[in-house]
Amino acid sequence: MFRWRRFSTNLFLVTAAVGAFIFTVRQIEHRFSKPVHHGYHSEHPKFRKPDYVSHIDCRRLFEKDEKYLESLLYTNKLIKRSLDNKLLPRIVAKEEPFEDSCRKLRDRIIGDHPAPYLNYSIAFARNIYADYESLQILLSATYSPENHYCYHVDVKATQKFKDQIAKLEQCFPNIYVTKEQYNVTSDGKNNNIAHLKCMEILLEKPGWEHLILLQAHDLVAHTNSELMKMLKLLNGTNDSNLSGMLWNRVPPGLSFDVKDLNLWTNYTTLTFDERKNARLEFAKGLEEATYIRPAIQWLVKEINVTTLMDHFNNGHHSVDEQLFATFLNSETLRMPGGYHSACMKNRPDGFFTYITRHTRWSFEGHKNCNERHMICLYGIEDLEDARLTARRVISLNKFIGSFDFAAITCMAESLFNRTHGGDEYFDVEHIANHSGNRYQRATRLPGFDLKNFTSFVGGAAAQCPSNWTQISNLCVWYSGNTYRSWDDSQAYCKSVGGQLAGSYNKSILPQLQKLVTAPLYPAWTGLFRTNATASWKFIDKTSALYLAGQWAPGQPAAGTGNCGGVQTTGLAAISCKYVQPFLCSQKIATCPSKNYTTSTGTVTSPNYPLNYANNEHCRQYIVAPAGYYVTLTFNAWLVERNYDVVLIWDGYAPNVNAQLIANISVDPTNATVSQYKDGFQTYSNIMTIEFISDSIVNYKGWSASYKMLAPQVPVYQNGSSGTMTSPNYPGQYMNNLEQYYQAVAPDGMQICTSLSYFDTELNKDRLEMYDGPNSTYPLIGNFSGHSVALPSTRQTTGNVLTMFFYTDYSLVYKGFSMDWGVC
């Protein structure tokens, strides 16, 4: 109330002085900025939900309260899907009336709750076409005058939507809209140019250090303060999920030689020789990415992207994924914050840490997935998963207002509360060890040698078995003078832990050809077709769309056969019964070292639940806070007996002080590892799980659950009165607690208790009170949740009170405070 009075007074004085009601947004927000608070405080403002979602209790949804989900059935009739055979409601966004008043629009988005001042600026560029209501509510949760927001509005958008976005630009000095309106399509056409137009605008704006590229339904899941900390951890690197180029996306007949692409501008800093030797290293990656400011300067000023962008834009599918990724991957162009192409060519799968966007693909087996373009949409039942996933990424895709506006509202409320109440935990170590970050740091060290650089924390360079050749992320073996039919060749490859070489691309074919030493005898690969008119496929069931131009002259000729081999002049179709040399391949070992620092989690063998690779040797570390210990329990087990092994250490292996707890290599039919059902436990705060596989047979692997537990020191109080609190009160308690309390009054007296504060995760974290010295005595109190009536009192019949405070592995709150005394 005091702050509102002060604002009203100041507003009146300024109005009287200047005769107008118009303030700039920066002036209003500067007046109310305050330092970031860590932890919730009663004075922080309350998030304003639209009326038709005001009844939604978001906290209970984040806790996945099933009873509450069921209760929502009776408040809404828009039912569109089920969860565990139970119908769930869907509240779709209601169209907002157009607001022509800047004062009212600023009140909707800022009100009296501007974001705290951070002295840090972030830029956002987003391509949009609809769903204004979702955009506005998310903007109201985290809007900051320090940031810069640029939108490209699709030409197909409604006129009302275009007017609404234009009004945002008119009313806020740091919101910008591109003049150009392109037809952005679902196959990615014009996405690049739309984002580039925003880059041009934003480059003229001062202060920001990172630009985050977004699409319409990406929800940024962090506050400005959290984003600031995450982006600083990137330490001058860009973030993109690079992978191999798919040439079937590009029309044939186009030149991709640097000399034909008109790349250089008057601002290009490369020397003549550097330009002469420059080459593109093609890659693909999602359009959503995070770039440092010098990288945007380079894209807009120092390079001419037009010709290459047009080449890609005329493609057939996901045409937006190649342009920026190729620049990032081409080290000779020297894009700031970029990568070296060798990192991707020679990488194990998973080299590139990617944090800008998380996608729940429908083919990954998500339960009850409502999909759009093979992506699962987020609903209210997914909020717990969304919040946990967001600890390692910047944004989540897809949140759509026309599908579930309540889910978007709850995410916005969470962002708002953290903006004004304190940051939420995120996985610092995951981001600090970002593979691109590590590469950038390594390049700045004297004597940097790419050959000695490994992308993984503590990881060893990937290696192939003896007599096998590494090609990209594959180990390949040529049979030489050993000839077999196609079927027998595949059987042999499987016996040595691989399969016939397949699923290769243009860059791999020439390297396979070099291995073939008998030019008249093509070597079998994993290429086949079911009959003479069917499409060619690889043995791993992936499509072979990019074979055009890779066949040897005259191939594939009619009637030549349905199995594919490779020879020095290209691919050949041969009868599957012929005996030929053959090429076996297996994925290179991908086993990085990894640290786990969350209180609970799952550790698996590499690639689980698919087969692990041969020649793996990795260590995974579970690092608990000092004073804690770690427990591990296996959930699944399928490992080659006597040859592939799991070692469990107490401590940080291979440190000499680490103690071996277990050496496990049991029968693969023993899928549950029943003899280890009681699990393993460390005495120190670190557990090392070391996995080693040999060179031939591989299986599904293993999965195990871990917990970090604090040794529980019982709380004993004697006398006539006292106060008992949850651990760390008034801060948040920890996960996985089983805290014991006992109060003992003088003989002949009784104990009366009074809870003065109580706030825990509903139905998961609870306080139990017993009328006596242990839990066999009558239960006189069982408290859980956020709405316990206070003060809550209980009375014993004797002079002893015993309590237990239990917490699970997920959400944490402040807990409780309880006074007791004789009565």
Image: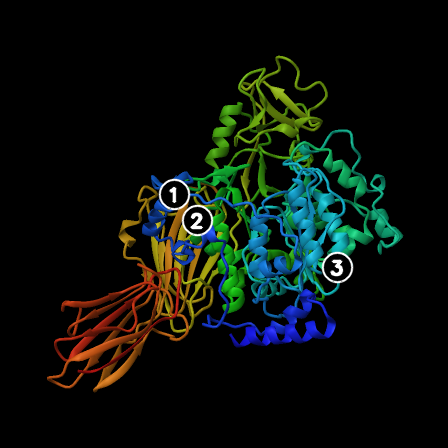
The residue labelled by disc 2 is 380
Label 2 to label 1: alpha-carbon separation: 9 Å
Q: Amino acid at mark 3?
A: Pro
Q: Are marks 2 and 1 in contact (CB under 8 Å)?
A: yes
Indicate the secondary structure of the residue bearing disc 3: helix
Q: Tell which of 43 and 270 is nearer to you.
A: 43
**Percent x, y of residue 688:** 43, 61
Q: Quadrant of residue 473?
A: top right
Compared with 499, 464 (above or below) is below
Label 2 Cα neighbours within 10 Å, binned few <14 / some 14-19 / many ≥20: many
**Percent x, y of residue 11:** 64, 72
Compared with 127, 818 (above or below) is below
**Percent x, y of residue 95:** 55, 45
Residue reaching furthest to the left: 748
Question: In this view of the protein, can residue 463 be seen by the observer?
Answer: no
**Percent x, y of residue 317:** 65, 34
The residue positioned 49% from the left and 59% from the top of the image is: 413
- The image's mark for residue 294 is 3
Label 3 Cα neighbours within 10 Å, binned few <14 / some 14-19 / many ≥20: some
Q: Amino acid at mark 2?
A: Ile
The residue labelled by disc 1 is 88
Compared with 391, 719 (above or below) is below
The residue positioned 46% from the left and 56% from the top of the image is: 388
Point out the frontmost of discs 2 and 3: 2
Label 1 Cα neighbours within 10 Å, binned few <14 / some 14-19 / many ≥20: many
Question: In this view of the protein, can residue 709 be seen by the observer?
Answer: yes
Q: Amino acid at mark 1?
A: Leu
Q: Tell which of 304 and 59 is nearer to you.
A: 59
